[in-house]
Amino acid sequence: MKILENVSLAQYSTMRLGGNARYFAEVKSNDDLLGSLDFAKNNGLNFHVLGSGSNSIFQDTGFSGLVIAMRTMGAKETEANNELQLTVGAGEIWDDIVKLSTHKGYFDVASLSLIPGTVGAAPVQNIGAYGQQVSDVIDTVRAYDTSKGIFVEISNKDCEFKYRKSRFNTTDKKRFIITSVTMRFCRKNIAPPFYSDITNYLQSHHIDERTITPIQLREAISNIRAVKLPDPADIASCGSFFKNPLVSEAEYSQLSTQFPELKSHKTDDGNLKLYAGQLIELCGLKGFHDQETGMATWKNQALVVVNESAKSTNDLLKFKKIIVTIVQKKFGITLEQEPEIIAV
Ligand SMILES: Cc1cc2nc3c(=O)[nH]c(=O)nc-3n(C[C@H](O)[C@H](O)[C@H](O)COP(=O)(O)OP(=O)(O)OC[C@H]3O[C@@H](n4cnc5c(N)ncnc54)[C@H](O)[C@@H]3O)c2cc1C
């Protein structure tokens, strides 16, 4: 394993912004991982674990320590009694797993088609879409526990999965470096009702909801997403840039008298989730191109911020401030950023 110096991080974030990493290592095995951690320790450096950077924004000052890019690859597959078990290296691409499992006839993660990123990052925020989440299939996560200095196996329950959360991005943030994930797939059937986007797609493509196959569902989701979201291979973005804000019932009833069109969704804790994309759209900021910063909101989904010609992360942060200020003024709600800004 080579430890590189002064590597541009813009190429390792789908937002394509940010300065240099002082040191950078591509980790392909457990030995590489231990070697890179030794290097960081011996040189008194912080480290940052990187997947494919689709939820990570690097600052203009870059990262002063060691960036550890997880590239542990490979997939072990066993199938028996209508159940598929996969143990997959952290560096594998998540969508390849969706492709493999749907092609083998399983529905479990078909709705997670086309979510960018690596397998190792998927448990961190418990990726999800259209009613499915990766925690539905995770059996165990294998990781290096940096606080104990040993490799460990963590059961699904002990990952403490919640909506877009796990212990890996909350209580134990940065403690575990995930090296592989074991998943079990068993859903051979799926029944309507589907999300309205999916139902509309299936109707317009004359596909019967009751006899849909996993491959057809994957295709439907992929095509729906391709229309709504920019492809990170062509357009620089980190997907949804703002979290959906939560408000109390009282706040919602006040807001909805003034803005009756506001959509909401009741959460388990009795609060109401509003849609950040709708708030931005109602401010007239869908498809808003800012010449000064070179940033824009996406034409088909205001929640997505894209980098058209920005020169720095500072440009992105200026653009964010414009959106946050306008939304705050109109609704009294302060939008919070979704992708992680990596500390220097
Ligand atoms: C166009 C677009 C659409 C998106 N749509 C969705 C969506 O529908 N649903 C959804 O949930 N997300 C979505 N995302 C967000 C993104 O796909 C996920 O957050 C994904 O899991 C990030 O993977 P990554 O490998 O790029 O992670 P990175 O951005 O590299 O890392 C994300 C976090 O995970 C940590 N991490 C990465 N690898 C490891 C590891 N091996 N061990 C420990 N920690 C690790 C990093 O330190 C960082 O904190 C979207 C992003 C984009 C750009």
Image: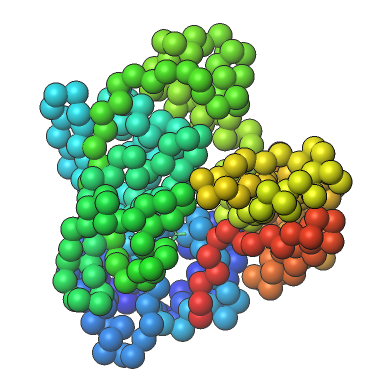
Q: Is residue 23 left or right of residue 55?
A: left
Residue located farthest toward the front when viewing the structure as drawn = 250
For residue 13, say whether it is visible. Answer: no
- Vertical position of residue 242 compared to residue 341: above or below: above
| Residue 255 image position (x, y, % from top left) | 79, 49
**Which of the two residues, 145 or 271, is positioned nearer the viewer here?**
271
Q: How is the image coloured?
A: rainbow
Residue placed at 49% from the left, 9% from the top?
A: 208
Q: Which residue: 34% across, 56% down?
A: 160
From the top left corner, tell me how far across and down residue 243 is, in percent.
61, 55
Look at the image and tell me in which quarter the N terminus lies.
bottom left
Q: For the point 80% across and 55% down, which residue is it?
A: 331
Q: Position of residue 330 (x, y in %)?
A: 84, 56
Residue 148 coordinates in the image, percent (x, y): 20, 76
**Closer-to-camera residue (324/204):** 324
Residue 259, relative to residue 296: is it above or below? above
Q: Is residue 221 visible?
A: yes
- State which quadrant residue 25 falls in: bottom left
Residue nearest the observer in this picture, 242 or 121 = 242
* Quadrant position of residue 4: bottom left
Tell me the quarter of the picture where residue 100 sits.
Answer: top left
| Quadrant of the displayed image that contains ligand 1 | bottom left
Q: Is residue 282 left or right of residue 93?
A: right
Looking at this view, is 334 or 121 the one in front? 334
Tally the marks.
0
Q: Residue at x 42, y 65 (%)?
A: 170
Q: Is residue 56 above or below residue 112?
A: below
